[in-house]
Amino acid sequence: YHPRHPHLPTSATPFPHCSPGTSPGRLPPFPPPKTLTTPRTAAMEQANPRAGSARNRKVVLRDYISRAPREDDMALVDGGAVPLRVPEGAAGPAVLVKNLYLSCDPYMRGRMRDFHGSYIPPFKPGSVIEGLGVARVVDSTHPGFVAGDIVSGMTGWEEYSLIDKPEQLNKIQQSDIPLSYHLGLLGMPGFTAYVGFYEICSPKKGEFVFVSAASGAVGQIVGQLAKLHGCYVVGSAGTNEKVELLKDKFGFDAAFNYKEEPDLTAALKRYFPEGIDIYFENVGGPMLDAVLLNMRMHGRIAVCGMVSQHGMTDPAGIHNLFCLVPKRISMKGFIQSDYINLFPQFLDYMTKHYKDGKIAYLEDMSIGLENAPAAFVGLFSAFPFARLGS
């Protein structure tokens, strides 16, 4: 745990707040990856050395929602004292961890609905919210982990979590790369970008690539992978500041603010006069319709997500799907966990290119569980590129 996170810029240009409701018919903006830290201090942890226990604060979901999330949909509660050891008589090997970093990801919004037909079950009202995290092992009855190990995997939005499926944890080999990057660049968002671009899009050098929500956790990496592959890359984002970021920091050839484009189809024609070979889909809705009209023959669309449709009880339909037929377009949805066998290969690839300075990365850090609800809600508005201190 780094109290002041020296790897982050000490000053960042904050983006102005923008509510998705201020521009009817437009897609919501998409922020950079959001990470939470849970500082280990005496006041917050209230550890009891004699009893070997600590207070366990946690963030729970109050009830299911069918709209955009609000801070009061979640509550910070005192979970009482937790023994700093794996309980005796557990059904199988388990690992007790102290959570250091927690990830806020858009897919978690879908888990707040009372919907059981997805690839991942919904949260349970009144129970701790689950998410990806980086943690330190406190105690373990699994032979693969010992106290002091740093791990990543699914955990809870709480100070301490008991992991009853430790085989799903990844042990982190510590290096000069910040631990929090294992939730973004070297974690699920980075792996999603890697799988989606290389396995789904099958890119060729010189092809034309479009990335929506390009400043987000996945999009910023997709664009850089495409540039490394020798492609021409354009991204869309929700503010002019993000547009400049895409061009200046992440190396996109061009970028545009979709909110300033009255005609998305015409905008894409302007940036891709010869058409689009590859579209990395993150938003759905009107943007997908516009892309379909601008795709080239035998184009490929990797459907990573459709953030504009999250939480909608009556999702908007797509009007231009017939374009798939005459243009022979391949359009495929994917989940990164289906390609988990490629994770070691991805980790080596991404680590090398990051250390060589060929991939840049930006994260948004908040400190403390008490800031978790605001951090999550901020994913669905134009949350500023700024961190909150403890």
Image (cartoon, grey):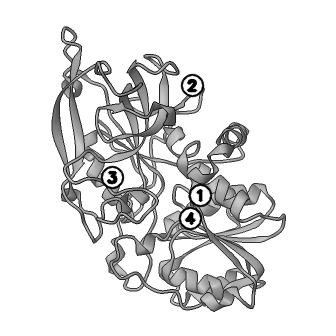
Q: Which residue is mark 3?
A: 375
Amino acid type of the residue that numbered disc 3 sits on in the rendered structure: Ala
Asked where in the image residue 165 lies, by quadrant, the reply is: top left
Q: Which residue is mark 4?
A: 304
SS class of the residue under badge 1? helix
Establish if 181 lies above or below 383. Answer: above
- The residue drawn where x is 55% and y is 90% is 263
SS class of the residue under badge 3? helix
Amino acid type of the residue that numbered disc 1 sits on in the rendered structure: Gln
Q: Disc 1 versus disc 3: distance between alpha carbons?
A: 19 Å
SS class of the residue under badge 4? loop
What number is the disc on residue 220?
1
Instruction: Answer whether labels 2 and 1 touch (C-beta < 8 Å).
Output: no
In this picture, residue 327 sits left or right of residue 129: right
Establish if 262 lies above or below 256. Answer: below
Q: Position of residue 43 (x, y in %)?
A: 19, 25
Q: Disc 3 versus disc 2: distance between alpha carbons?
A: 26 Å
What number is the disc on residue 174?
2
SS class of the residue under badge 2? loop
Which of label 4 and label 3 is nearer to you?
Answer: 4
- The residue drawn where x is 46% and y is 31% is 166
Which of label 4 and label 2 is nearer to you?
Answer: 4
Which badge, 4 or 1, comes first in the chain's sequence? 1
